Amino acid sequence: MGLKGKLTASLELKCGGHSVFEVFHTNTHHIVNICPRNVAHFEVHEGEIIKAGSIVSWKYTRLDKISI
């Protein structure tokens, strides 16, 4: 069973745009280390991180509730 939706956040960063793109595009698995209070788990089930059609799961906290 899959969930569809949009998660929007606002952050203030002190780095170049290429660094942000690199984290979300090729090093997505590092987000768990960057903000462990908000993202508890990231796993690639099928495919690769940077490939279209990959199946991944996220476990994150939203409004003090854990969501998957």
Image: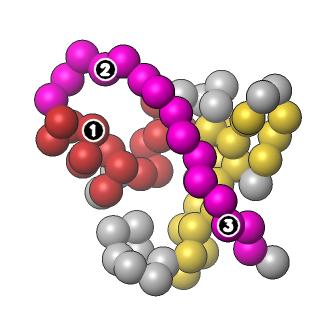
Q: Residue at x 36, y 49 (%)?
A: 24
State the SS at label 3.
loop
Q: Residue 60 location, x and y as percent?
A: 69, 42
Is residue 47 in view?
no
Q: Between disc 3 and disc 1, whose residue precedes?
A: 3
Q: Quadrant of residue 55?
A: bottom right
Q: Residue at x 59, y 61 (%)?
A: 43
Quadrant containing the N terminus is: bottom right
Q: Are marks 2 and 1 in contact (CB under 8 Å)?
A: yes
Q: Residue at x 62, y 38 (%)?
A: 39
Question: Which residue range is magenta in the image?
Answer: 2-16
Q: Are marks 3 and 1 in contact (CB under 8 Å)?
A: no
Q: Between disc 2 and disc 1, whose residue precedes?
A: 2
Residue that badge 2 annotates: 13
Q: Between disc 2 and disc 3, whose residue precedes?
A: 3
Q: Amino acid at mark 2?
A: Leu
Snapshot colouring: secondary structure
Q: Residue 45 location, x and y as percent?
A: 60, 75
- CA–CA distance in space, label 3 to label 1: 24 Å
State the SS at label 2.
loop
14 inside magenta stretch: yes
Q: Amino acid at mark 3?
A: Lys
Determine whether, in the image, residue 63 is placed left or right of residue 42: right
- CA–CA distance in space, label 2 to label 3: 27 Å
- CA–CA distance in space, label 2 to label 1: 9 Å
Quadrant containing the C terminus is: bottom right
Residue that badge 3 annotates: 4
Q: Amino acid at mark 1?
A: Val
Q: Quadrant of residue 65?
A: top right
